[in-house]
């Protein structure tokens, strides 16, 4: 018993065994119900198969979300109602302008640039001899955590005084060209752009893989027909490729936008949100878990939620359309 | 169907029409093949060099890393494993990442297994079982993906901190939180895959007197294995790389924090100790990279299908 309680792997094994036992009991109940009960058997099966997941969702997602909404109208300790004060604070505190401005720049630049780079690259390597390898190279960062990516790029941006030898790749290059080294991560407002570059580095591979698959799915008869009509390459790209892959483009753009709205790991790892690099999701974390102000933190979470809704709605509508078109 | 319907498997399509001139070929001829190749190579290099530089650096002695760029390694190779030794097993202040690696593993395995089993069962309830209101509940589950994790963090934490279970089972809250957050997407994906299984198969088995449990175990699970693998890999990498849940649900408890939380902290507190950061970053990346490289096919499928994760 000691192993299960006091050892980490023991705890891991214990939870898996306990979970397996629970599932076995549930399935046994469903099996028995299937055999003996008359009318209730359908409900027994439903309760066993769907019940656990639904229960967890209600307790762990729906209730907390409602509770967060409720808390956003209360003070730091959720004792007294404060009306809209937390929301007013969210948009007027000294850091708010910077956080909103930065979040806005992130959400505009990351999806567009990642998609453009991913699309261009997908087209350039399409059906080349090394396509598979070329894809893996761009795709690899997708498997790297935001924290890992943050450290990778912090190293690329590393700054040393002009008298010292530069160990960061970018500054080494800049000084080699004869310019002064740049403090990439400290000097506002440009530093935000250098953080954004990291997110683009991660997301471009995702965009590339999805768009590459979409490009390959463009029906060849359309392409052949257009070619017979003597359409030039640019027209082909604009009038055939882009409209054909439009659903995938929308999914890629919205998906990256949503991920970007919630970004906090990169800022946290690379600048600690200092030097005017604050973003909404990181501010939410700070207020909730560093300053312990649940009211303001909740209000910020609700703001993020509200910003995400139109993107997701758009995404779902697009997916419904795809389903209608493609069956 | 999900997003996946619009974007078929990369490899399959590529082999279907090897000789056709595609729009891409046309576009390439517009840009000019030479310029196009150069651009592609430049992008590929830009995307690879940063990771490569970090990797090389992690094997250089501390004085070298701090006094010269990693590219000098190419002309003056000086190799050491000390950085890994130090960051994994050295003093606590150097990271002792081996402990955190174990934490990440202990967090990730149950946080992948539990939601996957529950989601597969729920997918069965939503695709094979027939009950009133099914479609509405399914849409509701799908819609839950839009709830950002941020919305659920504080109240969910409260539920755990008031229960006292965490004293005995410190990882419990991280496991449960990850499992819950994974459910909407996993249920949605597995439901889509399961709906593709021919109805006749299930009905034939039912006529033969098979109950739901045996249909689920004997017919669905084997057929669903590749789909489950895709979602599992996706979830594994997601949990392993997660910072937000790991940071909030382990509190300030260093004994159970995942690698990402420790690394993020080190990037702040030991920002100039590149011998530790470079090796540490690789320690955290090695497992997802192995999974990624060996199972890329499955991962791509999970990603294409799961590109709406909230």
Image (spheres, coloured by chain):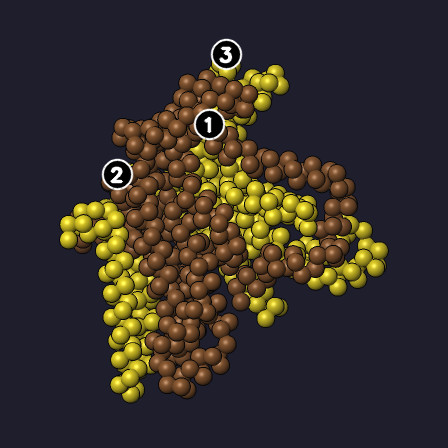
Chain colours: A yellow, B brown
- Answer whether labels 3 and 2 touch (C-beta < 8 Å): no
Asked whether the residues under marks 3 and 1 belong to the same chain, the reply is no
* B19 on left or right of B135: right
Identify the element where label 3 is drawn.
loop
Relative vertical location of residue B248 with respect to residue B134 in this rendering, above or below = above
Residue B227, given in percent of the width and then of the height, sits at 46, 63
Q: Earlier in the sequence, mark 1 or mark 2?
A: 1
| Mark 3 lies on residue | A163
Q: Residues within 10 Å of mark 3 (few under 14, many from 20)?
A: few
Towards the viewer: A320 or A275: A320
- Letter of the chain that mark 2 sits on in the rendering: B
Question: How many marks overall?
Answer: 3
Residue B147, given in percent of the width and then of the height, sits at 40, 56
- Residue A201, located in which quarter of the rendered image? top right
| Mark 2 lies on residue | B254
- Answer whether labels 1 and 2 touch (C-beta < 8 Å): no
């Amino acid at each position: 018993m000691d192993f299960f309680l006091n050892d980490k792997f023991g705890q891991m094994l214990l939870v898996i065994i306990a979970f397996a036992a629970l599932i076995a009991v549930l399935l046994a109940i469903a099996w028995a119900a299937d055999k003996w009960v008359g009318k209730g058997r359908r409900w027994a099966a439903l309760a066993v198969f769907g019940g656990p997941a639904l229960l967890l969702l209600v307790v762990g997602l729906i209730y907390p979300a409602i509770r967060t909404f409720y808390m956003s109208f209360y003070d730091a300790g959720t004792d007294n109602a404060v009306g809209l004060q937390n929301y007013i604070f969210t948009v007027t505190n000294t850091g708010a302008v910077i956080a909103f401005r930065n979040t806005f720049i992130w959400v505009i630049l990351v999806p567009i640039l990642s998609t453009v780079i991913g699309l261009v690259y997908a087209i350039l390597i399409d059906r080349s001899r090394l396509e598979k390898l070329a894809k893996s190279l761009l795709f690899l960062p997708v498997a790297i955590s935001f924290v890992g990516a943050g450290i990778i790029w912090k190293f690329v941006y590393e700054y040393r005084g002009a008298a010292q030898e530069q160990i960061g790749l970018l500054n080494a290059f800049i000084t080699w060209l004869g310019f002064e080294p740049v403090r990439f991560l400290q000097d506002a407002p440009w530093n935000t752009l250098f953080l954004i570059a990291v997110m683009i580095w991660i997301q471009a591979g995702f965009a590339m893989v999805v768009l590459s698959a979409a490009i390959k799915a463009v029906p060849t008869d359309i392409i052949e027909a257009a070619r017979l009509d003597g359409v030039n390459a640019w027209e082909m790209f604009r009038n055939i490729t882009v409209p054909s892959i439009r659903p995938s483009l929308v999914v890629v753009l919205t998906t990256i936008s949503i991920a970007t709205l919630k970004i906090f790991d990169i800022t946290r790892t690379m600048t600690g949100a200092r030097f005017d690099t604050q973003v909404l999701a990181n501010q939410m974390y700070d207020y909730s878990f560093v300053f312990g102000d649940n009211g303001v933190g909740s209000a910020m979470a609700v703001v993020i939620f509200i910003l995400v809704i139109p993107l997701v709605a758009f995404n779902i509508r697009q997916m419904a359309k795809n389903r209608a078109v493609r069956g | 169907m999900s997003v996946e319907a619009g974007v078929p498997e990369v490899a399959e399509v590529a082999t279907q029409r090897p000789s056709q001139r595609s729009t891409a070929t046309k576009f390439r001829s517009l840009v000019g093949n030479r310029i196009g190749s150069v651009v592609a190579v430049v992008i590929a290099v830009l995307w690879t060099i940063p990771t490569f530089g970090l990797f090389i650096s992690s094997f250089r002695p501390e004085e070298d890393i701090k006094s010269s760029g990693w590219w000098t390694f190419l002309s003056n190779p000086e190799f050491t494993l000390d950085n890994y030794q130090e960051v994994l097993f050295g003093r606590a202040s150097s990271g002792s990442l081996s402990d955190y690696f174990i934490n990440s593993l202990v967090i990730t395995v149950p946080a992948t297994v539990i939601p996957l089993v529950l989601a597969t069962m729920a997918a069965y309830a939503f695709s094979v079982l027939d009950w009133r209101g099914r479609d509405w509940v399914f849409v509701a589950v799908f819609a839950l993906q839009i709830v950002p994790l941020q919305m659920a963090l504080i109240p969910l934490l409260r539920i755990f901190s008031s229960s006292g279970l965490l004293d005995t089972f410190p990882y419990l809250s991280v496991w449960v939180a990850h499992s819950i957050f994974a459910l909407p997407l996993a249920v949605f994906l597995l439901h889509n895959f399961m709906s593709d299984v021919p109805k006749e198969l299930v009905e034939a088995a039912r006529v033969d007197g098979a109950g739901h449990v045996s249909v689920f175990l004997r017919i669905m699970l084997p057929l669903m294995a590749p789909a489950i693998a895709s979602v599992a890999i996706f979830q594994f990498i997601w949990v392993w790389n997660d910072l937000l849940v790991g940071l909030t649900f382990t509190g300030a408890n260093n004994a159970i924090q995942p690698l990402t939380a420790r690394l993020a902290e080190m990037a702040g507190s030991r920002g100039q100790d590149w011998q530790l950061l470079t090796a540490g970053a690789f320690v955290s990346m090695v497992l997802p990279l192995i999974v990624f490289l060996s199972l890329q096919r499955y991962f791509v499928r999970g990603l294409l299908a799961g590109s709406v994760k909230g």
